[in-house]
Image (tube, helix red, strand yellow):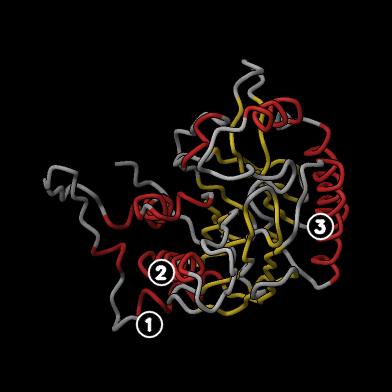
Amino acid sequence: MAQRSITVASAAIEVQWDPAANLARCEVEMREAARQGADLLVLPEQALQGYLPDTLSLDLDHVGYQQEHAEPLDGPSVRHMAALASQLGLHVIFGMTERDPRSPHVLYNTAVLLGPGGLVGSYRKVHQPGDEKHVYWPGDDFPVFDTELGRIGMLICYDKCFPETTRALALRGAQILVMPTAWAYQDTVCDPATDPMVDYYTLFGRVRALENQCWFVGSNLVGSLGRLQYHGHSRIIDPLGRIVADTGPEAGLAVAEIDVTGSIGRARSRGYIAYDFLKDYIPIDAGGAISRSTVPTAALEGRWTA
């Protein structure tokens, strides 16, 4: 658990359907984040292979592209980034198409967490919008990883629309909720001031941070890929739902120094009229049944599993 302030960077980058070029872009961002003193860098969803042409139509050519360029977690791209993370003393989270080593045709939309010591862990996207179902298999767990920076839980893009995602991570002890995403504009005008998808993106992120009283870090794409235009706004949100760093609609890094443990403690003890939402949380199942079997302190140690 982090007992000190750390520096977090969230990147807004443009990617291509060219894994070598994307890997080079990720390396540039890692070096720049390290130059700015970052302990953790977050890169977008599908930063290595590039996201789908869109989510509303089946594109068999793109299915073939993802099948051709997917890699296992011990593949050459991950090994390259792990070596660089070690060299830079950096933690980095990025999105990729993961190939299941047991069944090579099975692919996952995966977020990978690397540290200076190598692979820390990974998360496979659970909630799949639109055409992702034709490309990726869904994940089945929301793991939380202990690091020297704090306890990190990952989600990807559409997962953010479901409050159970981040609540499960928070109840398992996550302090930093990290979301690589490929979140596009809805309108062809692509005006970040009026586009509803930008507004929804902001609303979901701020609420997920506040309702769990955790840090929330989102990293989004920018620019055009396929039939989608991405709006950026890679950002860092504090445990009271306040945006403390934001790239806006342009490429770049949002960087902030954060006191992980102290700020969460303040948010849960006096930030919201002294209410600790995890302490007061009572599980309610889909049928409306209330369970009072949860011990609130379990969340402090990541022991909540219901």
In this view, 212 is above or below 58:
below
Residue at the (77%, 48%) spot, across then down: 16
According to the picture, the residue beneath numbered tag 2 turns out to be 213
Viewer-side label of 2, 3: 2
Left or right placement of residue 190 versus residue 239 in this view: right
Which residue lies most toward the front here? Answer: 188
Point out residue 60 in the picture as x, y percentages from the top left corner: 63, 27
Q: Amino acid at mark 3?
A: Gly
Q: CA distance from mark 1 to mark 2?
A: 9 Å
Q: Secondary structure at mark 3?
A: loop
**2 and 84: which is toward the camera:** 84
Q: CA distance from mark 3 to mark 1?
A: 33 Å
**46 and 118: which is toward the camera:** 46
Left or right placement of residue 118 versus residue 248 in this view: right
Labelled disc at residue 271: 1
According to the picture, the residue beneath numbered tag 3 turns out to be 89
Point out residue 188 in the picture as x, y percentages from the top left corner: 58, 63
- What is the crowding at mark 1: few (fewer than 14 residues within 10 Å), some, or many (at least 20)? some
Q: Secondary structure at mark 2?
A: loop
State which quarter of the image contains the N terminus: bottom right
Residues marked 2 and 3 touching at CB (< 8 Å): no
Point out residue 237 in the picture as x, y percentages from the top left corner: 53, 72
Left or right placement of residue 246 versus residue 159 in this view: right
Residues marked 1 and 2 touching at CB (< 8 Å): yes
Q: CA distance from mark 2 to mark 3?
A: 28 Å
- Indicate which disc, 1 or 2, sits on the residue closer to the N terminus: 2
Q: Amino acid at mark 1?
A: Gly
Q: Secondary structure at mark 1?
A: helix
- Indicate which disc, 3 or 1, sits on the residue closer to the N terminus: 3
